[in-house]
Amino acid sequence: MPQLALYTFGVLKSPLADPTPLTREFYDLGEAVYRQIGRHPGYLARAEAVDGRPGELFDADWGAWGEFAAPSWYDKGHTPETTALATPLSLWTGLRAAFDAIYTGLHREALNRRYDWFERTEHPNHVFWWVPDGVTPTWRDGVSRLDHLGVHGPAPRAFTFHDSFDPEGNPSRIRDIGPRSGHCDEEA
């Protein structure tokens, strides 16, 4: 059965290594969010470095998730001292599970404060796509799909919660979100 890949990308207002209380608060809350989401029904896995220290993304070994990559428009640092981004890459059983995890609990609280920590950009901040069972999406896949979404809009190759597609490429929606009516995925 296909699995749903989710790549998110946000540019932080200051580097992860910044010692200010606001950055520390973001980092600490992020750890708690990851723990909570990791226990959510429908969550399968997320990219985690095999080695490396906090903030070390570009030079870390990500195993099957591939070499770390960021969109070409990201113009901040690439070292542990200067990296200013947050970018999870994860796998889910479906849209409903991902939606429920993201819009409840600690992650919902973090979303409500996102502009305390993140810069506003004209680029999409998340993208979904379906992968065959047993396939691990890579960071480059995520960047490519996010770029595709930004240039071409939602399509079966790259979509959002509000404009989503089922594994066969048909438009779908989760009940109570998105502009479509009359279409519901099997999880709704």
Image (cartoon, helix red, strand yellow):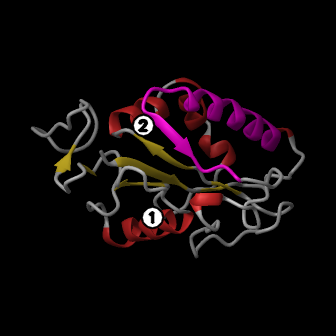
Q: Position of residue 105 (x, y in %)?
A: 54, 23
For label 1, the residue is 146
For label 2, the residue is 98
Q: Position of residue 7 (x, y in %)?
A: 50, 54
Instruction: Give the residue at x 83% y 52%.
Output: 53
Q: Nearer the viewer, residue 88 or 22?
A: 88
User: Mark 2 belongs to which amino acid?
Assistant: Ala
Of the 4 image quadrants, the one containing the N terminus is top left
Q: Which residues are magenta?
A: 22-49
Q: Residue furthest top?
A: 105
Q: Position of residue 111 (x, y in %)?
A: 55, 37
Q: Is residue 49 visible?
A: yes
Q: Name the element at disc 1.
A: helix
Q: Quadrant of residue 186?
A: top left
User: Mark 1 belongs to which amino acid?
Assistant: Leu
Going from N to C along the chain, the mark reached first, 1 or 2, is 2
